[in-house]
Image: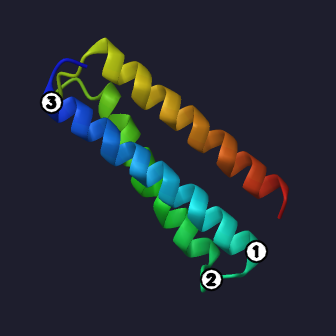
């Protein structure tokens, strides 16, 4: 992850993961005006961003690919837990 733009990409994807976790919690508790569609949209957004690590047209380092995969796995676990508790 030697390139500055890759560090920024990871930071953005981590922010999107935090937003997903917040939306899941808000939808679950009903504390905010959050619906399943909000969570679904965030899942799609985050999935699109983490998929950039697999895009052959975007040359990212192996470290960045690994970090994007790790974030994707974390998001997947959060979504599976959310769905199992519905």
Labels 2 & 1 near each other (Cβ < 8 A): yes
Q: Residue 46, position in %: x, y?
A: 43, 50
Q: Quadrant of residue 49?
A: top left
The C terminus - image quarter: bottom right
- Above or below residue 83? Residue 80 is above
Q: Secondary structure at mark 2?
A: loop
Label 2: how many Cα within 10 Å (few below 14, some 14–19, many 20+) = few
- Above or below residue 18? Residue 34 is below
Residue 4 disc label: 3
Q: Secondary structure at mark 3?
A: helix
Q: Secondary structure at mark 1?
A: helix
Q: Which residue is mark 1?
A: 29
Residue at image position (65%, 72%) is 26
Labels 3 & 2 near each other (Cβ < 8 A): no
Residue at image position (19%, 17%) is 2
The N terminus - image quarter: top left
Residue at image position (49%, 60%) is 19
Residue 32 disc label: 2
- Above or below residue 65? Residue 31 is below
Gap between marks 1 and 3 measured at Cα: 38 Å
């Amino acid at each position: 992850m030697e390139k500055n733009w890759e560090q920024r990409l990871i930071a953005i994807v981590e922010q999107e993961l935090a937003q997903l976790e917040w939306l899941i919690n808000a939808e679950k508790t009903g504390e905010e005006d959050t619906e399943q569609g909000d969570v679904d949209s965030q899942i799609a957004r985050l999935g699109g961003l983490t998929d950039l690590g697999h895009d052959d047209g975007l040359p990212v380092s192996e470290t960045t690919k690994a970090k994007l995969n790790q974030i994707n796995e974390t998001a997947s676990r959060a979504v599976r837990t959310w769905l199992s508790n519905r």
